[in-house]
Amino acid sequence: MLKLKTGLMVGALMVALSGTAFAGKKDDTIRFAYEQVPENVDPYFNNVRIGVILGQLVWDTLIFRDPVTNEYKGQLAKSWKWVDDKTLDLDLREGVKFHNGQDFDADDVVYTLNFVGKAENKVTTQTNVNWIESAEKLGKYQVRIKLKRAFPAAIEYLAGPVVIHSGKYYAEAGPLGMNAKPVGSGPYKVVEHTIGKSIKLTANPDYPASLNKRVPKIKNLEIRFIPDRQTQTAEVMSENLDFIMGVAVDQALGMKAVPHLQVVEGETMRIVFLNFNLTEQSPTPAIKDIRVRKAIAHAIPREAMVKQLVGEKARIINAICFPTQFGCDDKLAPRYAYDLTKARELMKEAGYGPDKKLELEIVAYRERDQTEAMIGALRSIHINAKLQFLQYAAMREHLRLNKAAIAHQTWGSFSVNDVSAGTPVYFKFLSDDMARDPEVRDLLEKGDSSVDPAARKEAYAKALGMIQERVLGVPLYSLTTHYVANGALQFNTYPDEIPRFWEMSWK
Amino acid sequence: MASKNMASKSSMAGKTFQRILGHRGLVIGLVLLGVIFAMAIFAPLLSPFDPYDQDLGRRLIPPFWSPKANPAHLLGTDNLGRDYLSRILYGARISLLIGFAVMLISGLIGTTLGLLAGYFGGRVDLAITFLITTRLAIPVVLVALAVVAMIGGSLVVVILVLGLLKWDRIAVVMRAATQQVRGLDYIAAAEAAGASVPRIILKEVLPNVFPQLIVVATVEAASAILLEAALSFLGLGVQPPLPSWGLMIAEAKTMMFFAFWMIAIPGSMLALLVFAINLVGDGLRDLIVPKRRG
Amino acid sequence: MLGYALKRLGTALAVAIFVSILSFMLLRMSGDVAIALAGEGARAEDIELIRKLNGLDRPLMVQYFDWLGHAALGDFGTSLYFKSPVMPLIADKIGNTIILSVASLAFALLIGVPLGVLAAVYQGGWVDRLALGIAVTGQALPNFFLALVLVMLFSVQLRWLPVSGSGTWLHFVLPTITLGYYITPPFMRIVRAGMVDALEMDYVRTARAKGLSKASVVLKHALANALVPVVALAGVQLGLLLGGSVVIETIFALDGLGYLAYQSITHKDFPVTQAILLMLSIAYVGLTLLADLVNAWIDPRIRLA
């Protein structure tokens, strides 16, 4: 009895002590947790989504893409003009200040672009910057960007991953200094960055009204890195967090029942598809038989998976690209509806049946339940798929060494709304291309480098159609993400998976 | 207090009682272990469903004690609509396989090293003691995680990694036991009779240190089962859709606040198995090495 | 004593170096770091460039000695993932792990030693059986499972304790219990065994015969004897705790060395994993060395043997 009493007293004491932890509205702080730690918060030196999010919070881009209409608008650049295929002139905005008080002008753009464009500076995702030849100053508020090759999607990159640093500060601090003490010109400024643990941000009161983002309505933002999903869930359920994202559908449903929480499903640009190893070194030559690949395409219950495992807002896709991306047109792509009878017939023609099963390996790196569901589906058409579930880097290595016949891939295109950031990665003879079809490659190349939008669209549509005709991959669906938030938080979601914290407010 | 007499009396009675208790623990452990063995062996007969068969239309059905239960699925279904009872039954196979396979590999390495060190002494002993010390200084969990992370997890990889890492305690115990036996007369007699060294070690030494081997190997099997579960829990263990209990906890942990039974069932099974093995280990220790329970 | 200490120190050093070679080779042979570094969407030429820039194309032994030479001077290179020096990264996290390990050890000692004493004194009684029960279940319960149950109970249901992080001492309560509970049984067993032996020794019987009270006999004579092996065990357990908190630190997002190790492993951040492995093995070797020396100092027979 005595022990029980002491226990209760200790408990009461603990409640009193931890009372300050309870979140949100009271101290005007959004507490947000993310599972992955960015290797460096400088947007050029990481390749995780939280890096893209931070890029939009702390920094700004030259051009702005409206997340709803997908229309391009001026941001740090007031306007821009193509001089020729490989030359872009931009007029810059005046009156923008970096968080360290320095004024923004052409020197910042020139330094940033010249720095990131050089391969030896080792920007993590080279495809984001390797089209930049150089940048030069035409006036205090005028710059010219020279491209290495004709690359019409440059505008999209300038509106996304290519953020502008303070040239002077970046020259002094470099990417490491930028990580330790980030300085940008975005709506939030970093107060404290504890590497690998948390980032504390506060509203930038000097953010100009002329830009497309705004001075945040909620003053403080605290980002914590919590690797375990159920720990995030526990934190948000016990009101120590206000916002988490990327919650799986079952947990999201579970949390819907918690009174102080709201659950919102949002679309994402990340698509899911299967890739086949069709090279000479393919570990399973049988996969080179188009009948087997067609059978697989017919066997995967995409509708049921979307309904049960993904989310209501997921879209079934019929080509390997996200529907809003420029050039993502599936009009020439044949459809393969869910049809087990047909799939089994195709397998039978290819020589497989209950007595002769096809053994192969499938490799995956996220949404393991979805991979398992696919393995279950393949079992019913006499394919025994063995799973290798690996970290992303390990998966790529595994694929490059030709150890798996099928890859369960997902691709978010870095939120770039142009097919050039997606399909070519897997079908243009780059290192992730396991299909190696030269005709597809040539069509994609044509789409990437043509200047005429109509010609680009036509080339991409043909490429996407050809990929489906030859079943070089199986497009499945787009993913959705569930946001779980404090019930008092007012927010909107966007398919690029970037939470606009500066727009959020308390109800 | 009547302490003077009580002390000897209680220690006498205590000893007898303890022996019985020890035996009772052993009996309970053996019975539990037998049940889990039976589950593993007869899994195909006992399972109402194929543990790999999915049904996306029957996902997350709660177990029998819930009002929403479905009598066809006594322990409910998981997030892919697989029958939980069938997976638990087949899971016994995985855990037992891991326990015994790791025990076999580490037992082989540990016993060999221990026997050699204990029998030959001198430089051999120094070298092997050094190896053991080195092995003890390697953080097992970290190294196992690192290796599995890089070469990819599978049942075979996990068994090999754990087997190659967990021989230290067996080597220590075998070394000490061999040293004791080494000094005994009949070894000297065998040597004098001209028996070859391998023969002496295998025919004379090994049978005499075997009981201690069994005790320490049991403990190691339990610890290997827990380690596999921990690795699988962190996503760096065996690969799905294998119905490993550790993996089942890992797969269901995100659901624990909404469907606690999903981690409670495999978690309890795991605890029960390790509990049973430990009871057996303790019981055997009491019988074989009386007094020492440290 | 000095000779013994020097000899033990020499062995400890040799062990540490041997461990470093083993773990270096092991980590290097099991994966291509360059691919890991290159990340999502990298092309073959990026990967080759990264391999060259990081010196990953040199022979393994050259890489090892290069690394060891720097490590000896406290320079563990640059984290491949965080791109910042490894040493400050580790220095930043090690505090939390030390607090957690020492607290867990203290927890285990506070529970394990008294329980072991009581179990020995009342051998066969209910305390003994209870202690045995705790010991057997303690070792049977997977610690990550216990952690989840504790979080569910104390953080989500009762809201007494924070779930994750390392901001205040309260953040350490649940991880400490989880880890401490798991290492309590060995202490309890060893104290019990030592006490059972001691209580049957002649001098204890003599002391009792002289009419000293039971409590004083137990505490003064028997316990002192039974505590000797506890010192060695504490050294070993502390060494294991430092390396064994990976799972627990990850669950509680407790920003310590184990959590950093897990991050570095999943990111193939070889220099960080390597540095942590080396530091943990040195810590283990150092602690067991310390325990040996303390024991040799307490009990002269050890250093003569």
Image (cartoon, helix red, strand yellow):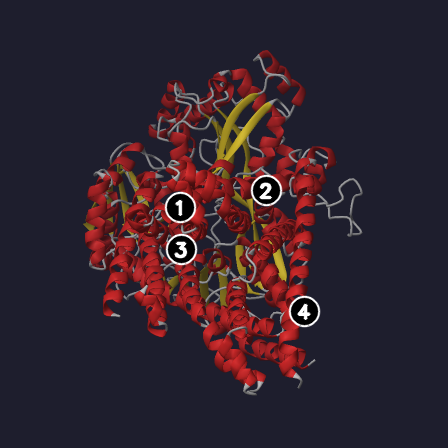
Q: Is residue B103 left or right of residue A429?
A: right
Chain-order first, disc 4 or disc 2: 4
Q: What amino acid is at disc 2?
A: Leu
Which of label 2 and label 1 is nearer to you? Answer: 1
Q: Chain of mark 4?
A: B
Which of label 4 and label 2 is nearer to you? Answer: 4
* Distance in Å between CA atoms under marks 1 and 4: 40 Å
Residue A54 marker? 3
Q: Residues within 10 Å of mark 3 (few under 14, many from 20)?
A: many
The reply to the same-chain question for discs 1 and 4 is yes
Q: What amino acid is at disc 1?
A: Ala
The reply to the same-chain question for discs 2 and 3 is no
* Distance in Å between CA atoms under marks 2 and 3: 47 Å
Element on which disc 1 rests: helix
Which of label 3 and label 4 is nearer to you? Answer: 4
Across and down, in percent, residue B111 comes to 44, 44
